[in-house]
Amino acid sequence: MPAKKEVEFPEEILVSLKTSEDELIKEMKLALAVKYFKEKKLSVGQAAELAEMPEEDFIRYLGEEEISVFRYDDLEELEEDIENA
Protein backbone atom coordinates (compact mmCIF):
# COMPACT_ATOMS: atom_id res chain seq x y z
CA MET A 1 0.00 0.00 0.00
CA PRO A 2 1.53 3.32 -1.01
CA ALA A 3 2.40 5.81 1.69
CA LYS A 4 0.71 9.17 1.22
CA LYS A 5 1.79 12.56 2.42
CA GLU A 6 0.24 15.84 1.46
CA VAL A 7 2.75 18.40 0.23
CA GLU A 8 1.95 22.07 -0.12
CA PHE A 9 3.84 24.46 -2.36
CA PRO A 10 3.68 28.24 -2.16
CA GLU A 11 1.84 29.58 -5.19
CA GLU A 12 4.81 31.86 -5.96
CA ILE A 13 7.03 28.80 -6.45
CA LEU A 14 4.62 27.27 -8.94
CA VAL A 15 4.35 30.59 -10.79
CA SER A 16 8.14 31.04 -10.85
CA LEU A 17 8.61 27.51 -12.17
CA LYS A 18 5.70 27.93 -14.60
CA THR A 19 4.35 24.54 -13.64
CA SER A 20 1.42 22.93 -11.88
CA GLU A 21 1.51 21.26 -8.50
CA ASP A 22 0.97 17.85 -10.15
CA GLU A 23 3.82 18.42 -12.60
CA LEU A 24 6.17 19.54 -9.82
CA ILE A 25 5.37 16.42 -7.78
CA LYS A 26 6.00 14.27 -10.85
CA GLU A 27 9.38 15.96 -11.40
CA MET A 28 10.28 15.54 -7.72
CA LYS A 29 9.49 11.83 -7.82
CA LEU A 30 11.64 11.41 -10.93
CA ALA A 31 14.51 13.35 -9.35
CA LEU A 32 14.34 11.22 -6.20
CA ALA A 33 14.15 8.02 -8.23
CA VAL A 34 17.29 8.99 -10.16
CA LYS A 35 19.09 10.06 -6.98
CA TYR A 36 18.35 6.82 -5.13
CA PHE A 37 19.18 4.73 -8.20
CA LYS A 38 22.56 6.46 -8.58
CA GLU A 39 23.23 5.91 -4.86
CA LYS A 40 22.38 2.20 -5.37
CA LYS A 41 19.56 2.43 -2.84
CA LEU A 42 16.94 1.40 -5.42
CA SER A 43 17.00 -1.03 -8.32
CA VAL A 44 15.96 0.11 -11.79
CA GLY A 45 12.52 -1.41 -11.22
CA GLN A 46 12.07 0.22 -7.83
CA ALA A 47 13.24 3.59 -9.12
CA ALA A 48 10.88 3.34 -12.10
CA GLU A 49 8.04 2.56 -9.71
CA LEU A 50 8.90 5.59 -7.56
CA ALA A 51 8.98 7.75 -10.69
CA GLU A 52 5.65 6.22 -11.75
CA MET A 53 7.10 5.29 -15.14
CA PRO A 54 7.31 2.03 -17.05
CA GLU A 55 10.75 0.51 -16.49
CA GLU A 56 11.63 0.88 -20.19
CA ASP A 57 10.86 4.61 -20.09
CA PHE A 58 12.91 5.06 -16.93
CA ILE A 59 15.88 3.26 -18.51
CA ARG A 60 15.50 5.44 -21.61
CA TYR A 61 15.44 8.55 -19.40
CA LEU A 62 18.61 7.42 -17.62
CA GLY A 63 20.27 7.02 -21.02
CA GLU A 64 19.21 10.51 -22.07
CA GLU A 65 20.78 11.82 -18.86
CA GLU A 66 23.91 9.73 -19.55
CA ILE A 67 23.39 7.64 -16.41
CA SER A 68 24.44 4.03 -16.85
CA VAL A 69 22.05 1.29 -15.80
CA PHE A 70 25.02 -1.04 -15.35
CA ARG A 71 26.35 -1.24 -11.82
CA TYR A 72 29.84 -2.62 -11.84
CA ASP A 73 32.32 -1.44 -9.25
CA ASP A 74 35.24 -3.06 -10.99
CA LEU A 75 36.22 -4.53 -14.34
CA GLU A 76 36.58 -8.03 -12.90
CA GLU A 77 32.91 -8.14 -11.89
CA LEU A 78 31.85 -7.02 -15.38
CA GLU A 79 34.08 -9.60 -17.09
CA GLU A 80 32.68 -12.34 -14.84
CA ASP A 81 29.11 -11.44 -15.78
CA ILE A 82 30.03 -11.40 -19.48
CA GLU A 83 31.59 -14.87 -19.18
CA ASN A 84 28.51 -16.21 -17.41
CA ALA A 85 26.06 -14.72 -19.90
Image (spheres, rainbow, N blue to C red):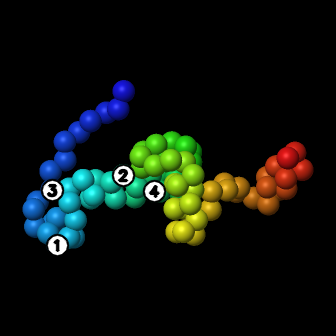
Mark sitting earlier along the chain (4/3): 3
Amino acid at dot 1: Ser
From the viewer's perspective, tell me whether residue 47 is left or right of residue 9. Answer: right
Mark sitting earlier along the chain (2/4): 2
Q: Does dot 1 land on a helix, a strand or a loop?
A: helix
Amino acid at dot 2: Lys
Q: Does dot 2 land on a helix, a strand or a loop?
A: helix
Mark sitting earlier along the chain (3/1): 3
Q: Are marks 2 and 4 in contact (CB under 8 Å)?
A: no
Q: Which mark is residue 35?
A: 4
Q: Which residue is mark 1?
A: 16
**Residue at the spot 45% in from the left edge and 56% down from the top edge:** 35
Q: Rounded to the nearest whole Å, what is the CA distance between mark 2 and mark 4?
A: 10 Å
Give residue 10's quadrant in the image: bottom left
Q: Which mark is residue 29?
A: 2
* Mark 1 residue crowding within 10 angstroms, few (<14) / some (14–19) / many (20+): few
Is any part of residue 34 visible from this angle? Answer: yes
Q: Residue 22, image x and y in percent?
A: 24, 53
From the viewer's perspective, tell me whether residue 6 is left or right of residue 39. Answer: left
From the viewer's perspective, tell me whether residue 36 is left or right of residue 8. Answer: right
Q: Rounded to the nearest whole Å, what is the CA distance between mark 4 and mark 3?
A: 21 Å
Q: Which residue is mark 3?
A: 9
Q: Nearer the viewer, residue 78 or 55?
A: 55
Q: Rounded to the nearest whole Å, what is the CA distance between mark 1 and mark 2?
A: 19 Å
